[in-house]
Amino acid sequence: MNASTIRQGTAKQVSVRSVGAIVVEMVLILVLIALLPQTLELGESARRFPLVTTVVLLVLATLDLVMELLPAARRRLGFLEADYIATGTAAAVADAEPQTENDGGDATGRATTHRKAGQWGALVWLTAAAVGMFYLGYLVVTPIFLTAFFLWSRVPLKVAVGITITLSLFNYLVFYMYLGLR
Amino acid sequence: MLDGIQEALATLLTWPNPLIPVLGTVLGLIVGTMPGLGPAAGIALIIPVTYGWEPEQAFLLLASMIGGTSFAGSITAILVNTPGESSNAATLLDGYPMAKKGQASTALAISAASSAMGAIFGLAVFVAILPFSRELILKFSYPETFMVAVVGLFVIALVSRGSLVKGLIAGGLGFMISFIGRDLVTGETRYTFDSLVLDDGVDYIAVLIGLFALSEGLALLMEPDKPADQRKLGAQAHWRQIREGVAFCVRSPRIIVQSSAIGTICGVIPGVGGSVSSFLSYAAAKQSAKDPESFGTGDPRGVAASEAANDAKDGGALLPTVAFGLPGSATWAVVLGAFLVHGIAPGREMLTEHLDVVFLIISGLLISNVLTSLIGLGLSPVLAPIAKMPGVYVAPVIFVISLVGAYTIGLRRSDILVALIAGVVGFVLKKYGFGLVPIVLGLILGKLVEQSLGQTMLTMGLGSLVTRPISLTILLLGLAAFVVPLLRGAVRTRREPKQKQGEESPDKVKGDAR
């Protein structure tokens, strides 16, 4: 990792982040608005803190959304965006001698043969594991999930079998036998 | 104090407890070497396994793991050009160039020795300050508890990853999650949507596991595999270089002490985290050197500076965590959750009835830092390949262990779904600039803040928040810590209206979970 890589990655990350950040803020605002009626129905003591927190969150989320949407607002309120600690650490990184990307020498470039999950793929696999465990239990789902995932990812057979057996045994010995999880 | 030390020693020497630091150190080394699994995620996964243990044993294990993960991260930084966690990123700046020059074992030895020395320094400072902070804590009542929690949350939002506004939003989200379930005073249910499962609230360990472990697993799956350069260690040169590395640290007390002091101070400030302390220490060592241009080319001082600070911070971070319930970093935020799971509340209770636990944690950190240096140096050629493991191998393992761990908490299948949701939400929030530590803190402190405010209003009135001297002092210090940087930033923004905006902070080291 060197300073130029960090800066290049930074520019790309900003543009990708903006749209996603806007969506996140809007979802957050909608959820908070949806929770307001329920909050107002609570008794006085029970609603005091949640109501204050909800209102403050709405203000902050709206402020953040405005800063994401309007460059002028972002400029004026830019000091709120400053990552106070990271600014200092970034300076330390930038001052350091840059590392070279290509080492030469012993660098072992290895072609990737695995299938990459991608954003949605990763979420689907995680959800499948969780839902599987919810309905069928962890002892059954662990070897099935790992086998299915490794087959799909084209992981070498030895590695797949090794990890599947090891983790299934680990679950059985630690969680089932030692902790008595039934 | 002496009673606490004696009890801790007695516990430590009772069989099989002497084995626990060894187990924790080895676990920490393995966890710290695995890509994507930082100490926070690793500890979150181990907590469910310690449910049946005595609290003292559990904390001895967790503290030992912290020591182990820290050095393990430097092994991968030096040998494989990949920091095990964000706090080891500064080590990479000079450690990897040293490895390229054929001095890998020297770099590892410097890392090991400086880590151990830094840890001892940080813990010594903590033990020295403990009696004074204990006296202070005993004077705390409801207004002080409320003020520390709220101000601490604001300060953590200020220094955590991402912008201030996002930090505050994250803290607020943590509060909102803590409100789910029954109100402590009236028993009224809040945000349960008529679900019996949510009546008891959301288990924070399941949330911790999701936020730290599952979100990292998701990130791992999405990252491309990097061809990693591994420097092979020749057996002949290995031990000679180790002796040279240790000797370097012994000959460089100034760097060690300076870096340890920086690390300890950073650790004391809640939420600052390891990456800040190691980078600040690195920058300080470079600026104070007569030949700063050598830093970044394989200067052993760079490795010593970052690693000493990285381990010293744990001693410093222990103080706000046990005394005030404010974690010094993401790792200590998870340990804080473990305190509550084992029925130990930080603050007054911890420093009076459970002082032996505090000294056991100190023992665990001390022993593991020494053991890590010894075991880690010997095992480094074996551990290094683990860091090369592609994410596609590691991520499903993280998924399985995390989900099972979440189920272990209360044997409720709903906790699996809680962990899943927390994992997805944590991944999304982290991706778009929200820190995870404020969420955890809001979640853990939410009920405490609400309860202490209610008790303050009932017993002393709201005015006591500003009339009691300690409470007022905390408020003023918090305001100063919060408002001064904002004002400075606002003034700077006015003076430079055309400053380029939209440049995101480049502090995007893999596994950063401050």
Image (cartoon, coloured by chain):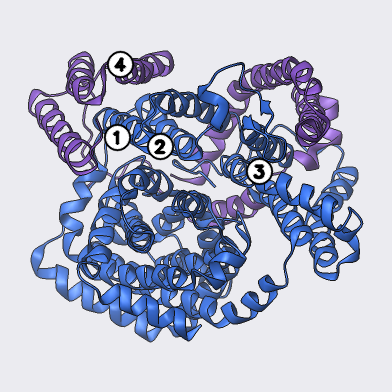
Chain colours: A purple, B blue
Q: Residue at the spot x=45%, y=51% of the render?
A: B338
Residue B117: x, y in percent? 40, 77
- The residue marked by circle 3 belongs to what chain? B
Q: Position of residue A26 (x, y in %)?
A: 71, 17
Residue type beneath disc 4? Gly
Give left or right: position of B89 versus A55. Answer: left
Write down the residue under mark 1: B401
Q: Quadrant of residue A29?
A: top right
Q: Which residue is mark 3?
A: B447
* Res. A132 mark: 4
Q: Chain of mark 2?
A: B
Q: Are marks 2 and 1 in contact (CB under 8 Å)?
A: yes
Q: Is residue B115 above or below residue B101?
A: below
Which element type, helix, strand or loop, lies under badge 4?
A: helix
Gap in Å between the C-alphas at discs 4 and 2?
Answer: 19 Å
Q: What residue is disc 2 on?
A: B213
Pinpoint residue B403: horizontal percent, then vertical percent. Answer: 35, 30
Residue type at numbered disc 2: Ala
